Amino acid sequence: MAGWLGRLKAGLARSSARLSDDLAAIFTGKKLDAEALQELEDTLIAADLGPATAARLAKAVGRERFEKDTGADEAREALAGEIAKILEPVARKLEIDGARKPHVILVVGVNGTGKTTTVGKLAKQLSEEGRSVMLCAGDTFRAAAIDQLKIWGERAGAPVVAGAPGANPAGLVYDALARARTEGADVLLVDTAGRLHNKANLMAELEKIIRVMRKLDADAPHSTLLVLDATTGQNAHAQVELFAKAAPVSGLVVTKLDGSAKGGVIVALAERFAIPVVAVGVGEAIDDLRPFAARDFARSLLGLDP
Amino acid sequence: MFENLSTRLGAIFEKLTRRGALGEADVDDALREVRVALLEADVALPVVKDFLDRVRVRAVGHEVVRSVTPGQMVIKIVHDNLVEMLGGATAEIDLAANPPVAILMVGLQGSGKTTTSAKLALHLKTRHKKKVLLASLDVRRPAAQEQLAVLGRQAEIATLSIVPGEPPVAIARRALQSAALEAYDAVILDTAGRLAIDEDLMAELALVRDAARPVETLLVADAMSGQDAVNVAKAFHARLGLTGIVLARVDGDARGGAALSMRAVTGCPIKLVGVGEKLDALEAFHPERVAGRILGMGDVVGLVERASEAIEQADAERLARRIEKGQFDLDDMAKQLRQVRKMGGLEGLLGMMPGVQKVKKQIAAANIDEAILKRQEAIIASMTKRERRDPDVIKASRRQRIAAGSGTSVQDVNKLLKQFFEMQKMMKRMGKLGTKGLMRAGFPGMGQMARPHGFPQR
């Protein structure tokens, strides 16, 4: 347990280094006056929380701390508390229903967010939990995406159902589900092509994939994960909104949190959509997919010990 | 969630009617709204501050031109400054060096480097008549080299053979050697995605640069990037000396403030933008369009281009001729329906138009169903050829058959026919005006066609 916490912290430490430096600069030896409050708000904006959320959080902290001799640590604690409060309800694990054979997990998102990598990492973790996992290479569009997933499949020891490049993804998903059912797989992980949420035809294709899999299992997909890139800014709002319209998005995965991007938009997303954040990606290795821990995340963002 | 800036400024300036010049307080009020608009568009905070300081100086005391509101005046000043800051003239790829010219593509994971590399190769081949070699130095992401090879085959561009286990610097050297031997004009080096803070990988990239001595080092960045874009661009620029930026996924609906941030901190021009998944979807950068998007004022130019793309010129001319002769029939109507859908549906179209946020809300309230367009197409598809040519023959029993065939009701069929006859009447009037009148009117009757039952007229 301490192992992954440590790794998560290490991953997040880099993203929070700047934020905490900024905050330290604001609060050390300084009272929380209007100017310091504005700087605090700016720091949150620079972390991609968005202007509205940043203003509201800064105000909340200000209301409590104004005119008091608030030190750096105290203000940070308060802010971490505010952020954690928002995130706690959405920090939930990916639940696999053991009664389903298979439990279908559909992975969707815009291009380049890390869907295939996430599928690979998830496959490894789920098979380590003792489940039989099957992969479906539903990205038949991007060149060599099928090969990429096959390599992940080998690493995770999971069979990959794949078609020819350019094949109809809905048909392929149908075949994969049929095979997973006959072979009694516990989990079927379906990778899909990256698609921009504002492209009507591509979103219709996604809807079709779901429609077709429901011909075999009316409740499928049992989980739909939207993969978000931590470097994404306010457009994440539109991504969640439109993907949730086309698919029953039940969880978010936030990738690339090991970079300098802070992924603060999650805070605003949690408030607006309340969709669970089931995992975060903190590196390229197969084990770098971690549960999302609200309190640790909020505290790490502010450079505080868990 | 993003409200149009002009709507917001409109509210601020409502109280101020006629004024000679923009006062300091007016400008400050307006710039507060501009600040929020820029931040919602993901322009980095330090860049926003610089920009606002600049605009403030220019806006205070500015004469308000008669016939525009102070709000519009401020928007114009903001817009003009944005365009200026984004870089006026379009910058082309620099090929002025002894061939083979090396072009190094760098960026974060998933920013679109590999696809952009192939697009750039095709761009150089078709627009500049260059012989281009593609080489993937990405030995990290599984099947990345394979991906570039496949894209090369699709674009009919040569790719360097893959040698398993070869390190990036060696691949770069081999690429340049083969390019020199085989008389290539340019070599595009696609590299693995890396974090700007990954010291080892950034050092590796510097070694590749020293080995390849590229004329262009292009940072490929995602148009959806947030505040961190500024740090990424700064870090890559400091380490490698960028010569330009390629903005990928401009065809998304992100407002693209990252473009301004990266341009401002590196001083590097944005040379190209990726506008689609196809390999020819790479275009020159137009600052005015991005400025409009950042401000949430729509992309009118983009709309016009999309419209002209979706509507085949020949089709349009044929339709014009038919209308002139008063021959508009249900087949023509079906074609129009398809065109609307091709352009991204009603919502997509409206999203690109300036100042329609209000209309959009009304539409959402009126519960416009995009499916209506599809249903109407289905109704027409359920008619016989004769019925489509001559709708007058469609009487009660035919209507029942069409409704059953298209899975709709007789009322739906009636509604469609009524719309059609109204359109036809209008077309006839239009035909009398001649083709010129038609062109001026745009797509005749489209507004009407798209209007579902109960949507307010006007």
Image (cartoon, coloured by chain):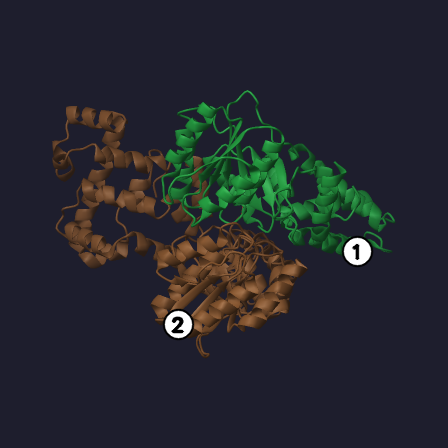
Chain colours: A green, B brown
Q: Nearer the viewer, mark 2 or mark 1?
A: 2
Q: Camera-side residue: B399 or B56?
A: B399
* Residue drawn at 17 percent across, 45 percent down: B328
Total count of labels: 2
Q: Is residue A49 above or below residue B405?
A: below
In the structure shown, which secondary structural element does the residue marked by tag 1 occupy? helix
Q: Position of residue A193 (x, y in %)?
A: 45, 43
Q: Camera-side residue: A116 or A242?
A: A116
The residue furthest top is A99
Q: Position of residue B136 (x, y in %)?
A: 49, 60
The image's mark for residue B130 is none
Chain letter belonging to callout 2? B
Q: Camera-side residue: B55 or A161?
A: A161
Q: Can see residue B283? A: no
Q: Mark 1 Cα within 10 Å, few/some/many (few <14, many 20+)? A: many
In the structure shown, which secondary structural element does the residue marked by tag 2 occupy? loop
Q: Position of residue A4 (x, y in %)?
A: 71, 40
Q: Is residue B437 above or below residue B268?
A: above
Chain letter belonging to callout 1? A
User: Which residue type carries mark 2?
Assistant: Glu
Q: Quadrant of the N terminus of chain B?
A: top right
Q: Mark 2 Cα within 10 Å, few/some/many (few <14, many 20+)? A: few
Q: Is residue A72 left or right of residue B235?
A: right
Q: Quadrant of the C terminus of chain B?
A: top left
User: Which residue type carries mark 1?
Assistant: Ile
Q: Can see residue B103? A: yes
The image's mark for residue B182 is 2
* Residue drawn at 22 percent across, 35 percent down: B381
Q: Position of residue B150 (x, y in %)?
A: 40, 54
Q: Is residue A279 above or below residue B173?
A: above
* Residue drawn at 26 percent across, 45 percent down: B336
Q: Which residue is mark 1?
A: A26
